[in-house]
Image: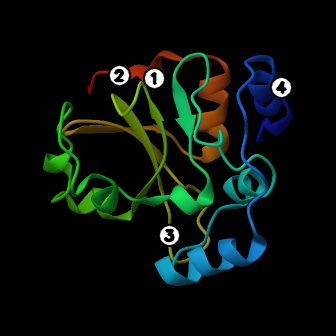
Amino acid sequence: MLKLKELREKWVIENTLYGSAADPEYLRSFQKENNVIIPEDLMTYFKSLNGTGGECTNELYEFYSIDRIVKVKDEFKNKKGIPDYKGLLAINEISKLYVFANFTFDLFVYAIKLYPDFSDENEVYILCGEKYQKIANSFSEFVELYLNDAKELYFPTRE
């Protein structure tokens, strides 16, 4: 279950501005242009909070509004610096991932897998340079990790 109230309260306490509600028409056009379905929990988030308004939280997380959500390949195609994300661009599994948040100015990036049809799971991945790993099965699970400052948010080791 999406803990939208808790997320909003955390950001208010931290004086983090959250974005204005996403335009429903923009949400529809995003889905059509990308041939994806935004899952219900993420859609609810966009319709209410819609990101941190370009600001970072106290812990240096930035959550994106719908108008900033892009595929991983588009997010990093021209990016230079450390970590170097270019190694991810050729990985097929990454092609359906859309970046929705970052930590410490792209040290870690969080992306969700969106599908052309409704799915029981919309996996969330943590990315760092050429490394990536699934950390949640849904946006709601990711928000739960975030609210609990879970260790998974700081790139767990692969097993």
Label 4 vs label 3: CA separation?
Answer: 30 Å
Mark 1 nearby-residue class (10 Å; few <14, some 14–19, many ≥20): some
Q: Mark 2 points at which residue?
A: 156
Residue closer to the observer: 39 or 129: 129
**Which type of secondary structure does the marked residue at label 2 adopt?**
loop
Q: Please state the horizontal and vertical placement of residue 99, each as a whole percent of the image.
A: 44, 51
Residues marked 3 and 1 touching at CB (< 8 Å)? no
Residue 108 in which image quadrant = top left
**Which type of secondary structure does the marked residue at label 4 adopt?**
helix
Residues marked 1 and 2 touching at CB (< 8 Å)? yes
Above or below residue 54? Residue 41 is below
Disc number for residue 115: 3
Label 1 vs label 2: CA separation?
Answer: 5 Å
**Which type of secondary structure does the marked residue at label 1 adopt?**
helix
Residue closer to the observer: 23 or 148: 23
Position of residue 13 in the picture relative to residue 39 (left or right): right
Q: Please state the horizontal and vertical placement of residue 151, each as a whole percent of the image.
A: 47, 16
Front tag of 4 and 1: 4
Residues marked 3 and 2 touching at CB (< 8 Å)? no
Above or below residue 14? Residue 127 is below
Q: Mark 1 points at which residue?
A: 152
Above or below residue 3? Residue 70 is below
Three-letter code for the amino acid on which mark 4 is drawn: Glu
Three-letter code for the amino acid on which mark 1 is drawn: Glu
Residue 37 in which image quadrant = bottom right
Front tag of 2 and 4: 4
Three-letter code for the amino acid on which mark 3 is drawn: Tyr
